[in-house]
Amino acid sequence: MSGAGKVYLIGAGPGDPGLLTLRGKEILEKADVVVYDRLVSPAILGFCNPKAKMVDVGKMPTHHKVKQSEINKLLVQFACEMPGATIARLKGGDPFVFGRGGEEALELVSAGVEFEVVPGITSAISVPAYAGIPVSHRGIATSFHIITGHEKAESSSKVIPAQAGISSAPVGLDFPALAKCPGTLIFLMGIANMDFIARRLMECGKDPKTPLAFIEKGTTPYQRTVMATLETAGETIARENVTAPAITIMGGVVELGQTLAWKKNLPLSGKRLVVTRAAKQASGITARLTALGAEVIETPMIETRSVDGGLDFNSLANFETLAFTSVNGVESFFRQLFAAGCDVRVLAGKKIASVGKITEKKLLEYGIRCDYVPEDHTGEGLGKLLAEKCTSHVIASEHGERGNRLEESRILLLQGNLADETLLKLLPQATRWVVYETLPVTELPEWKREAVAAADAVVFASSSAVENFVKMTDARPSLSFCIGRMTDAAASKHGFETVTSDETTMDSLVKKIAEYYSAAR
């Protein structure tokens, strides 16, 4: 169809955002529309173009929010109504592994809509792997078989509807053949039917002692593995309250899970954490927390932007000390410095002060080493340190000594528009430049609100993030991890249980989070 939008059938994988393919992420970042299922992780939805139209067609096992036939038509409708648009159909697992992607593709072909399939990692192999169960293993299983678990007791066959020239044919589970299969059997979905399936397999001769594993919510923070045998399948599901989404794996390889399970040993396994840092700064802590087993929902609460064109770099000659109070201040200062046609040579001979180690590290990226970093990584700590240097100079001058030659009137404070008056009170003769603005995020999509409400804790790096988070959310975690005293005070004021890092660094914060949950085990 000439001029129509293009539809991408994307497999989101089993849940862990790290298992989304690079191709899938690339398309989501530019998509104009994203039509997604309920099993798609909120962390993956976080990759989507923030301007995309988000359409939830999530289906529950007993209630279809949007019928499959309506989803098919919806994809065609978006393509026809939005010429040149990128339409992402985001599906759990792989679109063509019991994902009904073939039905959607056939509908698109019938309508003449261009489409592309972006395969995803199927839960059939990834979920067992996260539980330490290899689907094949030398000497135990030389094949594996992926089977739908939707077989019902009252129906031994299904019919594929005829469409796009494909003739219909009955499809059902061949229990006698499955019972004789020496390989690993992997049933996707259908926990509600597993008692019937287990009984039919035993009736057809499969060993009742065959090991089974039910794996709930695989690769997510809430993954759980329940062991059973074929003969105890039904009673185990009922006793352990095994619920969808879950897969069932049968065969000797299941026993390897007792030894090879690795994910459950990660310190943050089973935890969902909300990170409120600005998007451009969140990736570092997200990667660290994810590596420790957490699911991270990036939910920026503030945005920053440079105050372009408002700085007189010619007047830098009037200052001998530049004091940076944040990473944002560093980035905005140098962005504007370079835009004005200057470079770091204008800082030659000047003293450089940083509020803490994170800001000091950012300055080093620009080739600037700090002369002053307070032990107390706060604005108050920085102000007291510089005031002390100024006082030391005065005392030294009275005794005829050179001292540090730090003059308060020649100190330049580089801050954001929301900075308090702490530094100016301690250094009243200093000059302040506002080099960036901090703006609160004003919208939070519904899918992200739901993810935040179900999180275990929230991570704060600033008091302004705390204030806006409280303003933007109703249902939220009661536990928070904070950097610095001011952030802790803001969170405590709003009723959060707070855990604060020993130092004002991301490494210290991540260490504190890991220690907290390790101690709680």
Image: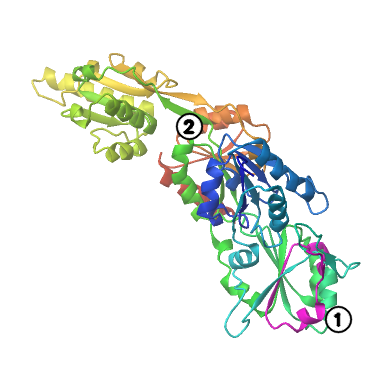
How far across and how far down the image is residue 310, in percent? Answer: 34, 17
Circle 1 crowding by C-alpha within 10 Å: few under 14, some 14–19, many from 20 = some
Assign the N terminus to one quadrant of the image: top right
Q: In 3D space, how far apart are the residues under numbered discs 1 and 2 (Cα atoms)?
A: 63 Å
Q: Is residue 190 magenta?
A: yes
Instruction: Estimate how packed mark 2 is, as few (under 14), some (14 to 19) or many (20 or more) residues with alpha carbons within 10 Å.
Output: many
Give the residue type that dot 1 points to: Glu
In depth, the one of 157 and 478 nearer the eye is 157
Q: Report the residue marked by disc 2.
A: 462
The residue shown at (73%, 56%) is 103
Q: In this view, does 241 lie to the left or right of 397?
A: right
* Residue 248 in which image quadrant: bottom right
What's drawn in magenta, residue-wise?
A: 167-194
Q: Give the residue number, with chain letter if any, for mark 1.
A: 203
Considering the numbered disc 2 on the image, is that residue within a helix, a strand or a loop? Answer: loop
Residue 63 seen by the camera: yes
**Quadrant where the image shows the C terminus:** bottom right
